[in-house]
Amino acid sequence: MFDAIGIAGSGLDTYKTWIDALSDNVANVNTARPMSSPAFQERFIVAQSVEGGADNVGEGVAVTSVALGNPQGRVVYDPGNPLANAQGLVRLPDINLSDQMTALIIAQRAYQANAAVITRAQTAYQAALNIGKPT
């Protein structure tokens, strides 16, 4: 039972990190940069399963790194932007808002599922403690 809580807890940490990265991507989807600077780079969370001990049971998941998207971004003609160069060009991130929102919903649901596992494991543990107690 404690393994379930630990594994689901590692899932909570991983999905929280993913949600944070997606939120950062969504918040910067329209961040313009001058042509001389790199565009905001989309964040991708890289996670890996944590190998188990002697009983060969997995111990959850952990974030191993954060990968970054294309620093070139998209070149957009926006002559009214104060960051635009002489040709009226700026760099925007190469981020698809629809993809980010879809991933955000997936991450949110996975976070909720891991939270439910923890709640149910705690309920089962409490029930086990009450076995044999007079009612």
Image: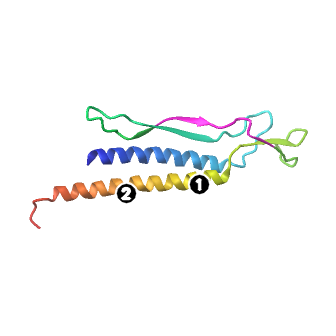
Say which residue appears at 15% left-offset and 59% top-offset: 130
Say which residue appears at 50% left-offset and 44% top-offset: 17
Asked if residue 71 is positioned above or below residue 76 in the image, the reply reads above
- In the image, the segment drawn in magenta is 63-75
Question: Does the stretch in magenta take in 64?
Answer: yes
Asked if residue 25 is positioned above or below residue 120 in the image, the reply reads above
Q: Determine the image quadrant of residue 90.
A: top right
Q: Main secondary structure of the magenta part?
A: strand
Circle 2 or circle 1, nearest the eye: 1
Say which residue appears at 22% left-offset and 57% top-offset: 126
Q: Is residue 88 left or right of residue 134?
A: right
- Give the alpha-carbon distance from disc 2 to disc 1, as whole Å: 21 Å
Asked if residue 117 is positioned above or below residue 66 in the image, the reply reads below
**How crowded is the residue under tag 1: few (<14 C-alpha within 10 Å), some, or many (20+)?**
few
Residue 54 at x, y = what percent? 26, 31
Q: Which amino acid does label 1 sit on?
A: Thr
Q: Which of 86 and 55 is in front in this view?
A: 55
Q: Is mark 2 on a helix, strand or loop?
A: helix
Q: Residue 102 carries which label?
A: 1
Q: Residue 116 carries which label?
A: 2
Q: Is residue 132 left or right of residue 121?
A: left
